[in-house]
Image (tube, grey):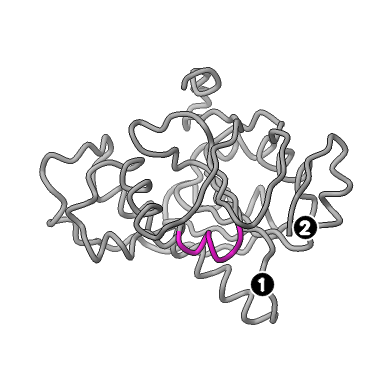
Amino acid sequence: ISITYNWIWSNLMEKIERVAICTAGEPRSLNYTHESIKKFFDTYFGEYDIFAYIPKCPTDFYMEKYFPNAHIEVKEDTYIDDTKIPSNNMFKTGTQRYLQQINGWKESNRMRKEYEKSKGFEYDWVIRSRIDVEYVPSLPPGDYTQDFLYLPNFHHFGGVNDRFAMGSSKLMDKYLNIIDIYNENPKKCLHAECFLKYCLDYQKVPFKLIDIRFMRVRDDGQKMKHDLVDR
């Protein structure tokens, strides 16, 4: 399946029959970002299913409030062994928070795969999206094929940006399940973007960088506008 970009996207809608959006994490700024997220996905994908794996937190009800048709699981975070991560790691928010994040990726993907099995089909495209972002509503022109994973072309920090990804179910399985590689070799887990790049290379996942843009939004509504211009 190949997606050929056009400004109306009517042809795109004919070619993409099934789209899954996997998301995870605390939706603490979703009250600020939900309109942008919905507009972005409505504009470019029309018909889609959302699979959200949410930890129990004060804002865990936001997902159902703003996306009532989403498939949602709310679960308590459980400790993930991080004792084998080298002490010289560069995780700004801590190793446990990072591991919970990538565990959420896998859990949202599990939800997607269970739904596929129950319905007897496979999604044509799977997208990983953060909840705390405001999209600039433009997907760059080009031919999108299922031979590649598509990642944002900014904020790589020596690896690759880990805030958005789009690809076939097969390739996105490899992206969303990188916690399995962590469990095999935790000493490789030193930095978020670098670890993702290592995992993609290790699994021989071909990817392309695209100039999609979005900015993170804090839980007080503050927009990280430098995300729109930084490289």
Q: Is residue 136 above or below residue 39?
A: above
Q: Are marks 1 and 2 in contact (CB under 8 Å)?
A: no
Instruction: Using the rendered image of the protein, determine whether residue 32 is visible from the camera's viewpoint.
Output: no
Magenta span: predominant SS is helix
Of pointers 1 and 2, the one earlier in the residue sequence: 2
Helix, strand, or loop for circle 1?
loop
In percent of width and height, residue 49 lies at 69, 60
Q: CA distance from mark 1 to mark 2?
A: 12 Å
Q: Is residue 105 above or below residue 87?
A: below
Instruction: Decide: few, some or many residues near mark 1? Use Cα within 10 Å; few <14, some 14-19, many ≥20.
Output: some
Name which residue type carries label 1: Glu
Q: Mark 1 sits on what residue?
A: 122
In the image, residue 169 lies in the stretch drawn in magenta: yes
The residue located at (32%, 42%) in the rendering is 194
Q: Secondary structure at mark 2?
A: loop
Image spot of residue 81 (x, y percent): 19, 61
Q: Quadrant of residue 162?
A: top left
Out of 156 and 145, give the one closest to the viewer. Answer: 145
Q: Is residue 32 left or right of residue 40?
A: left
192 on left or right of 207: left
Q: How many numbered badges does the structure rendering display?
A: 2
- Residue 214, percent across and down? 58, 30
- Tell me: residue 130, above or below residue 229: below
Looking at the rendered image, the quarter that the N terminus falls into is bottom right
Q: Which residue is mark 2?
A: 16
Q: Foreground: 122 or 41?
A: 122
Q: What segment is highlighted magenta in the picture?
A: 168-174
The three-letter amino acid code for the residue at tag 2 is Ile
Residue 134 in view in this figure: yes
Q: Residue at x 51, y 45 (%)?
A: 27
In the picture shown, does residue 95 fall above or below 90?
Answer: below
